[in-house]
Amino acid sequence: MSDSMKPTLATVLVSCPDRPGIVAALAQTLYGHGANILDSDQHTDTLARQFFQRVRFDLSSLHTDRTALERGLGEVAERFEMKLQLRYAAQRKRVAIFVSRYDHCLYDLLLRHRAGELDCDIVLVVSNHPDLAPVAAQFDIPFEHFPITKDDKLAQERRQLARLRELEVDLVVLARYMQVLSSQMTDALQSRVINIHHSFLPAFAGGRPYHQAYQRGVKLIGATAHYATADLDEGPIIDQGVVACSHRDSVEDLVRKGRDLEKVVLARAVRWHLQDRILVYSNKTVVFE
């Protein structure tokens, strides 16, 4: 059963300067309000002196109310200079998928969603080409075409942003969307845009990475899922995967192997985001698996 089908579940994500007493303060606050902690994971970056924690708990035994709980957690956050995020499982995230002409990642995400692997509502497919409208139609997902040229790119992005706000979209997934997002988009959707890059970043950034890999004669090719930022292919990395290749592989072989990998890596990153397992800091991530 997915978390969203258990309306009494919630998750707290925190990050703050490391110091004694953080774990105890959070646990005591949750216990004091009657919440039942189901699992907890934490990490300390000793170089940055930063602490990170994810706590998942059940609200069904609360003897106060959610407003009081939020106030209590807010007091802990203020005391420890925390960035604290409280997410209720019943509030399903709303997702938009951006694509161009490649359909493998789109099909994979829609099939996984239909199978119940991705706990969200996919509310829109956006594309700069009309080609994949029939794919969205197969899954009864609205499809909207925003043709983009060099001259109208920013204007179209403003239209896209307005549409995302109208639909209250929480996450944008770039499923091989072959457009470089402007800072207008990435700033408005900070840490809410996941991109799949068909390479093991930071190697072979930019276009045609499989051709670059072939020319270098690499023995591994990869795929990288990351949060998109204004700096192309340099956003915080969420997940990566690799597959072996050899001198016998043509560029077409590398592309085929890479596409299989792209689907798995992107789906995993999206699932972790939906499950509130990721914290971003210093252009990198902590992923609580």
Image (spheres, rainbow, N blue to C red):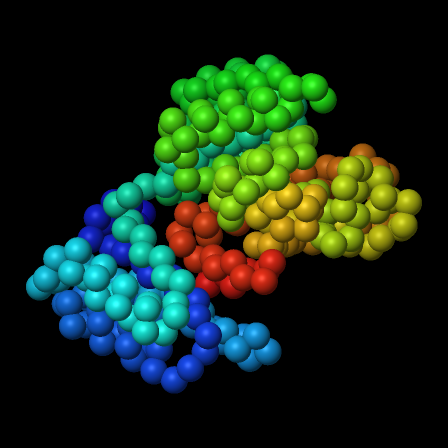
Q: Position of residue 285 (x, y in %)?
A: 55, 60
- What residue lies at 58% left-to-right and 62% top-to-bottom? 282
Return the residue found at the far left: 63
Q: In this view, does 97 lie above or below 278?
A: above
- What residue lies at 14% left-to-right and 67% top-to-bottom? 34
Q: In which quarter of the image is residue 248?
A: top right
Q: Position of residue 255 (x, y in %)?
A: 75, 37
Q: In this view, does 26 lie above or below 176?
A: below
Q: In this view, does 106 lie above or below 224?
A: above
Q: In this view, does 129 lie to the left or right of 258?
A: left
Return the residue found at the far bottom: 20
Q: Where is residue 78 in the image (x, y as percent from the top left)?
A: 32, 69
Q: In this view, does 199 lie to the left or right of 172?
A: right
Name the one closer to the observer, 131 or 169. Answer: 169
Q: Where is residue 226 in the image (x, y as percent from the top left)?
A: 60, 49
Q: Is residue 243 visible?
A: no
Q: In this view, does 113 lie to the left or right of 59?
A: right
Q: Tally the numbered discs.
A: 0
Name the one closer to the observer, 34 or 160. Answer: 160
Q: Is residue 276 visible?
A: yes
- What residue lies at 21% left-to-right and 66% top-to-bottom? 72
- What residue lies at 50% left-to-right and 73% top-to-bottom? 50
